[in-house]
Image (cartoon, rainbow, N blue to C red):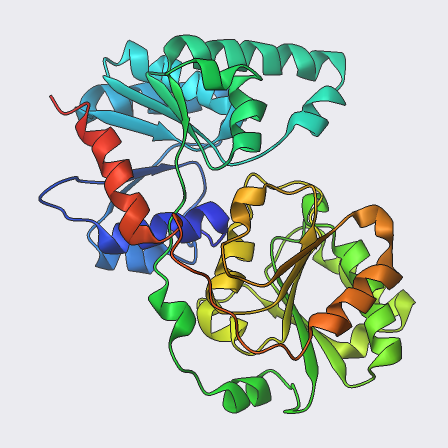
Amino acid sequence: MNRGGIETWLMQVLRRQDPARVTFELLLFTPEGGAYDAELRALGVTVRRCPSPRRVGAFLSCLWRTLRTGHYDVVHSHVHHFSGIILFVAWLAGVRGRIAHSHLNTEGLDRASAAPRRLYLRAMKAAIARWSSEGLAVSDQAAGALFGPGWRTQAQWRVLPLGLDPAPYTRPTNRAGLRASLGLAPEALVLGHIGWFRPAKNHPFLLRVFAEVLARRPESRLLLIGEGEQQEGVQALAGELGVLGAVVFAGPRDDVPALLQVMDVFVFPSHIEGLGLALIEAQMAGLPCVTADHLPPEAWLPGASVTALPLAAGAAAWAQTILEVAGQPAQFPAPHPYDLTHSLPLLLERYEHYRR
């Protein structure tokens, strides 16, 4: 299993699980060799694998066989629209608890889809409504995207916060030493971002914002954590903008809480997010954050430093805001529902509802 927002949350849940209360098994559709595989083995978590859903027959056969023989109380599906298929097979296999979990706000993308795709989306949403026992979402926007605009009127659907353990984000770290290991000078103004190199994360806009910041503060650097299919294109654009030498491509990392403490400002200009778990991580680390104003407001933690701007304001306005908040002292959030000690019992309560 590789790193990502959902995976980060899931690993924190697994590290805190009580095996006497709930036993977790994972069913993945990816090949072995993921970043979390060794830790999953160390935690004693059983990992099962099925072929890619693109191999329809082999995938459905594997899924049916796994769910039918596993004697599961709950199947918790995190694959958005495709959960319609997963939960239908779970129903056929006699699984009582069939949970669809929405982590994305895809309403805009869904509306812009071609006709065949819209038919698929309509069928999957109908399947989720029919074959799920309940649906969870990370935000109101994510709930509306998968469960429909009237989701609040139906007891089947609810928002459940994705909690994280706040302790690693406030743990003292060797900021100077970590900066040096990344080639970042002590005096550098470091802007940071965490996310897959995918269109939704809006790296081209982020680079243009950074170009504006660099023109005003030549000691600035941009730290990008993550990987993805668009990384080469982002690197090429950085070269075209003349900022490539000031951008650090750190790749996927397992020390994100420490790396957040290397940054001065966290910048999050995504086009779409179901919640924005990376933004929550940055706030837990006390960073001033500049984010797109259309993202779910549930991700803005009370007491944290978050400035929301429209993407239409342009790169220069974003750069000015970043420079205004840079240098703020660490501002940690007040108690909030995204603390794992609050959210994990709520999740386990949903699972135990289906205990045989």
Which residue is at the front of the view, 37 or 19?
A: 19
Farthest left residue? 20
Q: Residue 73, image x and y in percent?
A: 19, 25
Which residue is at the front of the view, 274 or 293?
A: 293
Q: Residue 165, image x and y in percent?
A: 34, 59
Which residue is at the front of the view, 106 or 120?
A: 106
- Residue 119, above or below 61: above
- Left or right of 260: which side holds 51? left
Residue, x 46% and y 87% (percent of image)?
A: 174
Query: Residue 110, located in which quarter of the rendered image?
Result: top right
Residue, x 50% and y 60% (percent of image)?
A: 303
Residue, x 56% and y 56% (percent of image)?
A: 279
- Left or right of 201: which side holds 216? right
- Residue 71, above or below 221: above
Q: Residue 290, image x and y in percent?
A: 68, 60
Q: Residue 129, image x and y in percent?
A: 44, 11
Residue, x 19% and y 25% (percent of image)?
A: 353
- Left or right of 126: which side holds 96? left
- Residue 322, above or below 105: below
Which residue is at the front of the view, 163 or 225?
A: 163
